[in-house]
């Protein structure tokens, strides 16, 4: 025992000396090539003296990085996360200048801007050297990964007798896209492909499709998966008549309220209650360890700072350097891909300028890196259940299409993240099962306004006899034109980016009020919602016809509309289609061609369930769907969309180890996020998971990990 400790200490000393030597050599090289950086006196020095100055400076820089750097970053924890990431470079340059000041006889000197570059390069080189040296030493490698992920102190020791579970949500990756990515001859996701059991007994994981609710979007799906109920969530955004507010799932206040309602409805904390961790999600799932969770982003006390995960990541300057380089590369990659799409005149196409390249880079690089590092820390801490959302594919597919080359590249990079997490599992204090799943898919197709030259809001206004807005006419729908529908593109990623920046919530405007209030028109992918604020409760079909005789026919007969849901005083929920077709859901009766037929089996049940929600809009509109191609038409500026019915957006997946019970029996179908929750909860119970009753009043606040 004593001998092994001495050996470990000896190896640690040798690693420190090796990193010191490489850092000093790096400093010498930089001093030789950078004009504003020197390690000699004004009259020049011998090679030996210069090398000693480099060694002194490198040692001082390394020591300050270890002792001072974590304190600096912790002091800046309340700074917006993205700002913190940029400040890392400036502050790291300041640490280097301090180290050079400590070099004897004033031999170390650098211009401030040069110091930033030198510090970034030295941090990256030192980190890479240390990682290379410890990768063969299990004990040191485990300690290194723990430090990079900033494991929280004070957590109870894990129960190493039972297996933990890591749930990785691949946001927006549909079942068909995932299956092609792992079952192809040359798979896009090589690591996951090795796990896939395609029926030949060669893999370790089973692939199961599941059908989403009508509201096929992250808010409804993840709320149901994590909290067991997505009741009364009709869309990604909707107007609530009781409060006069627009609820949007990616706003922290809305996410917090939806979580509160779900907990009150189910009576327990959620899937992760107890020794669980939530990373990068919209909702907490009752986890005790939270980072980058939107439902707590509005809280400001020290126990619930949702941006603390950024501290855990940026406390290592090498992480900031690596992520910054990848961030810039992603911005350039998106710029190049967008330019190629314009040169080729790809159709359909949406504008991808403005802030979008930076939002994409945030989702595919910054958030991915921080979430993956946090999951690694959770695994090494031995937490019983971890649920993390990786949003990169969803963000890119909205703008490039779910089957595009751009989106395929994101799948490959997600596979690398999964591989990294799986490698860390080998160093965990307990065995782990890795479960992959998605919250919905995406359906391709040209945007409604791009194809028909009129937005959903203008179509509704025309049906009401109201004047239309002035709009710019072009073959491509600008993203800004969706703002009146409160439908910014890439909603999930934009919400996370706003939280990271510490920006206040943007309150969507429900519209101008007049004596006869104008309708509020909102969009959620290819699902549209129309509400009349001056009418309390659900406005009936009969009242709509009395007030706006042409509205329902205008909508139902439009070629870009698949069906319209209204509530009739006589028949209850009624679906309207072209040619005066109707489907009375309560009675199960249809006249004419069934408007729900193109949307497949289960569509009637999904629409009927939503029609009973208190927050269902007065009129709910689903775009048309081509049953052969699965194309739909988003009411937002998107060419890959989800939120309603039609195509691949309604087919999500579960990818779980074969040792876990099959989610459904042969011939059955897994339907709805709430049923997925029951499956996952059952799996956790089998391994003595963290299911506990909802804490009562006075229970300690959730902690951020």
Image: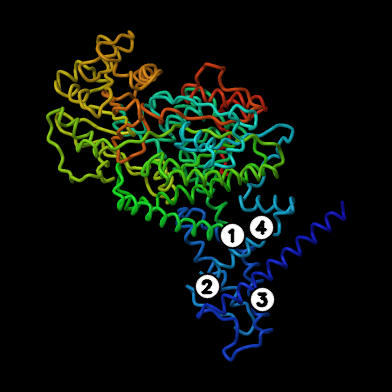
Are circles 4 and 2 on residues that touch, CB within 8 Å? no
Up-down: is 704 above or below 333?
A: above
Image x and y of residue 525, in percent: 34, 34
Q: Quadrant of residue 424?
A: top right
Judged by depth in the image, the label closer to the viewer, 1 or 2, is 2
| Number of residues whose C-alpha sits closer than 10 Å to that of mark 3, classed few (under 14), some (14–19) or many (20 or more) | many
Q: Quadrant of the C terminus?
A: top right
What separation in Å lies between label 1 and label 3 (alpha carbons)?
Answer: 23 Å
Query: Which is nearer the N-term, disc 3 or disc 4?
Result: 3
Are circles 1 and 2 on residues that touch, CB within 8 Å? no
Image x and y of residue 73, in percent: 55, 58
Up-down: is 234 above or below 61?
A: above
Q: Residue furthest bottom?
A: 43
Helix, strand or loop at disc 1?
Answer: helix
Judged by depth in the image, the label closer to the viewer, 4 or 1, is 4
What separation in Å lies between label 4 and label 1 (alpha carbons)?
Answer: 23 Å
* Tag 3 residue: 56
Query: Which is nearer the N-term, disc 3 or disc 2?
Result: 3
What separation in Å lies between label 1 and label 2 (alpha carbons)?
Answer: 20 Å
At x 62%, y 61%, the residue is: 127
* Tag 2 residue: 115
* Tag 1 residue: 71
**What numbered label is drawn on residue 367?**
none
What separation in Å lies between label 4 and label 2 (alpha carbons)?
Answer: 24 Å
* Tag 4 residue: 131
What separation in Å lies between label 3 and label 2 (alpha carbons)?
Answer: 16 Å
């Amino acid at each position: 025992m004593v001998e092994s400790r001495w050996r470990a200490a000896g190896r640690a000393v040798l690693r420190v000396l090796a990193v010191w030597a490489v850092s000093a050599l790096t400093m010498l090289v930089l001093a030789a090539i950078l004009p504003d950086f020197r390690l000699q006196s004004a009259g020049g020095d011998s090679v030996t003296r210069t090398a000693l100055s480099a060694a002194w400076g490198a040692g001082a820089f390394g020591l300050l990085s270890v002792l001072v750097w974590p304190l600096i970053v912790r002091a800046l924890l309340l700074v917006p996360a993205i700002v913190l990431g940029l400040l890392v470079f400036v502050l790291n340059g300041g640490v280097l200048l301090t180290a050079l000041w400590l070099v004897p006889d004033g031999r170390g000197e650098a211009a401030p801007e040069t110091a930033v570059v030198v510090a970034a390069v030295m941090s990256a080189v030192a980190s890479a050297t240390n990682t290379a040296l410890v990768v063969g030493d299990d004990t040191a490698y485990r300690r290194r990964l723990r430090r990079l992920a900033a494991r929280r102190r004070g957590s109870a020791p894990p129960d190493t007798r039972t297996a933990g579970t890591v749930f990785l949500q691949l946001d927006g990756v549909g079942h068909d896209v995932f299956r092609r990515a792992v079952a192809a001859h040359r798979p896009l996701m090589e690591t996951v492909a090795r796990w896939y059991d395609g029926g030949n007994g060669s893999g370790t994981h089973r692939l199961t499709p599941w059908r989403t609710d009508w509201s096929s979007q992250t808010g409804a799906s993840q709320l149901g998966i994590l909290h067991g109920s997505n009741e009364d969530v009709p869309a990604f955004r909707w107007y609530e008549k009781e409060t006069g507010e627009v609820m949007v799932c990616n706003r922290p206040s809305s996410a917090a309220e939806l979580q509160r309602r779900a907990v009150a409805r189910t009576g327990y904390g959620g899937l992760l209650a107890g020794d669980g961790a939530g990373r990068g999600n919209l909702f907490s799932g009752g986890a005790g360890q939270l980072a980058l969770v939107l439902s707590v982003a509005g809280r400001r006390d020290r126990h619930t700072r949702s941006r603390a995960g950024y501290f855990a990541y940026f406390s290592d300057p090498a992480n900031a350097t690596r992520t910054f380089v990848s961030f810039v590369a992603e911005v350039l990659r998106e710029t190049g891909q967008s330019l190629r799409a314009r040169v080729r005149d790809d159709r359909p196409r949406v504008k991808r300028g403005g802030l979008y390249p930076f939002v994409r880079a945030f989702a595919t690089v910054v958030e991915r890196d921080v979430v993956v590092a946090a999951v690694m820390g959770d695994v090494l801490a031995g937490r019983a259940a971890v649920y993390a959302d990786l949003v990169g594919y969803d963000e890119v597919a909205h703008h490039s299409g779910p089957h595009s080359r751009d989106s395929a590249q994101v799948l490959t990079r997600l596979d690398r993240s999964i591989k990294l997490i799986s490698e860390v599992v080998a160093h965990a204090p307990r065995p782990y099962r890795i479960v992959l799943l998605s919250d919905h898919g995406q359906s391709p197709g040209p945007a409604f306004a791009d194809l028909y030259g009129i937005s959903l809001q203008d179509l509704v206004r025309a049906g009401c006899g109201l004047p239309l807005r002035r709009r710019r006419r072009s073959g491509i729908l600008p993203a800004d034109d969706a703002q009146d529908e409160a439908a910014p593109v890439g909603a999930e990623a934009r919400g996370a980016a706003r939280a990271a920046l510490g920006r206040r919530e943007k309150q969507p405007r429900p519209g101008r009020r007049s004596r006869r209030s104008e309708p509020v028109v909102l969009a959620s992918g290819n699902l549209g919602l129309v509400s009349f604020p001056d009418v309390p409760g659900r406005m009936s079909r009969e009242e709509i016809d009395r007030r706006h005789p042409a509205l329902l026919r205008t909508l139902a007969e439009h070629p870009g509309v698949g069906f319209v849901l209204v509530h009739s005083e006589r028949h209850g929920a009624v679906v309207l289609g072209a040619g005066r077709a109707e489907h009375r859901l309560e009675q199960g009766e249809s006249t004419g061609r069934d408007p729900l037929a193109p949307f497949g089996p289960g569509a009637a049940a999904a629409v009927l369930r939503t029609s009973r929600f208190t927050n269902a809009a007065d009129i709910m509109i689903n775009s048309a769907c081509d049953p052969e191609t699965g194309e739909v038409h988003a009411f937002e500026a998107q060419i890959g969309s989800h939120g309603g019915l039609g195509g691949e957006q309604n087919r999500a997946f579960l990818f779980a180890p074969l040792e876990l019970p099959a989610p459904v029996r042969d011939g059955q179908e897994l339907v709805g996020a709430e049923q997925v929750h029951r499956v996952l909860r059952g799996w956790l119970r089998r391994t003595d998971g963290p299911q506990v009753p909802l804490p009562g009043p006075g229970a300690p606040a959730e902690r951020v990990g």
